[in-house]
Amino acid sequence: MDNVVPFSIHRDWTEKIKSIRFGKRKLTIIDERGNVKNYMFITVENTKNKKFKVSGYTRYFYFEGLGKTRIETLDYHAKVIVSFLNYVFFEKYKVYRIRKITDLDIKHGNEYLRDLKDGRIGNDQKTRQTVEKVERVLNKFYRFLLKECKDMEFVQKEDVHVKVSYSKQYGNVKQKFKREQDIYNTLFQVDYSSITASPPERIKSISSFVFSELLTLCDIHYPQLKLALCLQAFAGLRRGEVCNVSQDKIQYSMYGLDIGWFSINLKEVTQLRTDGIITGGIKKRRIQPVHPVFLSMFQEIYNQHLKLIEHVKNPFGALFLNRYGEAMTSQDYENKFTRLVKLLIERLLNNGDFLSLSEANLLMSGRMNTHVLRHFFTQFISELEQTRSPVEIAYWRGDSSLETAIIYLSHHPLIDDKISFIQKKVYEDLSR
């Protein structure tokens, strides 16, 4: 055994960490009333035997008010932090030789952001908006480390905090004093000038013609999405809120054969799946009504949808289901909507008339997601004489503040197809 040459300390460590990586986990707890609480964890995992343990970095999710943040935001933060930790501890170990977090340097963050920007992380070049968002998370993570680790060697509090000198006048005497503020500098220097990728402009409005074409395509390809689109377009629900709707959250009243009012209870996020996966979040807890002007069209689509799902046994009464009978998630909804938009563009191009080609060119010029349906809702209710006020717009949209409603109104184009037209046009399409 004398001729056996032992591994060097670094080679030995490299062998040990081959199967070790940081990961993220989410724990969902459901109380006796069906209310859901979510917790995010950063873990250390063995990729071979699948064992894991919770890492102390999980404390980050209770730093600077993150404990009150939506689970979707925490999930994004976890994704960035896990990617960064794997980068510095494992992927770049031969370069950095880092074994403990106190050896972390600002340059490691700079090089991570550089590689992310240039596409060496994630295999595609990122937009400036994406890199800036990651940079904000990394800044917060470094501040967390400064608070948690008292012996950070290469990052100091002075690198983060700004000390501001104030002057205050007391009669004829000007007194100067200094104090440290919770104002933070960015730690990193990213060369954004080299970024050539830019995201396509988001399409913020669609015409009634395009919306009616979407509903027609739903009948052909995604019948269960039709009501989902209408909840966004007729009641202003967000994507996650749509996927959080169950039958016991719906209330309505009939006046003869017609629905007099229809509302959705969005006061609580509830569990709608047996696997514990959260289908969607709620941004503002509220009771959300369908706007009266759309009720006649909505009633027909709602009844169609109930017939679609009447033979599907879902223990939670979820309104929107996937092919396995489980509640549809907001991401699944978004993915289906993206495919629906591609089908829409093909349909408009094949139509060949001037209006269809014009709308197809508009759709191809940008990106469109489900949020455009909330814009659609805002546009048309703002055309009504009785909803000119931003206060009323905010109410119907379920906004937390007037500022959001005012922003939407400021982007509202003066479209020539009024509410009466949209009602007539969509109803005609539904009746074909």
Image: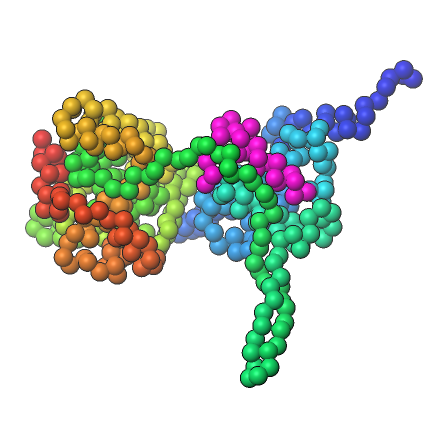
What percent of the width, then of the height, locates residue 285? 35, 55
Please say whether residue 135 is one of the residues in the magenta stretch: no
Q: Left or right: where does residue 402 sit relative to residue 28?
A: left
Q: Nearer the viewer, residue 261 or 337?
A: 337
Q: Left or right: where does residue 330 sit relative to residue 393?
A: right
Q: Left or right: where does residue 59 sit relative to residue 366?
A: right
Residue drawn at x 84%, y 22% is: 6
Q: Is residue 13 visible?
A: yes
What percent of the width, then of the height, locates residue 128? 47, 39
- Give the magenta-colored segment's residue range: 105-130
Q: Left or right: where does residue 1 sit relative to residue 222?
A: right
Residue drawn at x 71%, y 48% is: 152
Q: Main SS type for the magenta part?
A: helix
Question: Which quadrant holds the C terminus?
Answer: top left
Question: Which quadrant holds the N terminus?
Answer: top right
Quarter-wise, where is residue 201 in the image?
Answer: top left
Residue drawn at x 15%, y 31% is: 355
Please say whether residue 119 is one of the residues in the magenta stretch: yes
What percent of the width, then of the height, locates residue 160? 62, 53
User: Which residue occupies the extreme bottom position in the image?
Assistant: 171
Quarter-wise, where is residue 175 in the image?
Answer: bottom right
Quarter-wise, where is residue 91 in the image?
Answer: top right
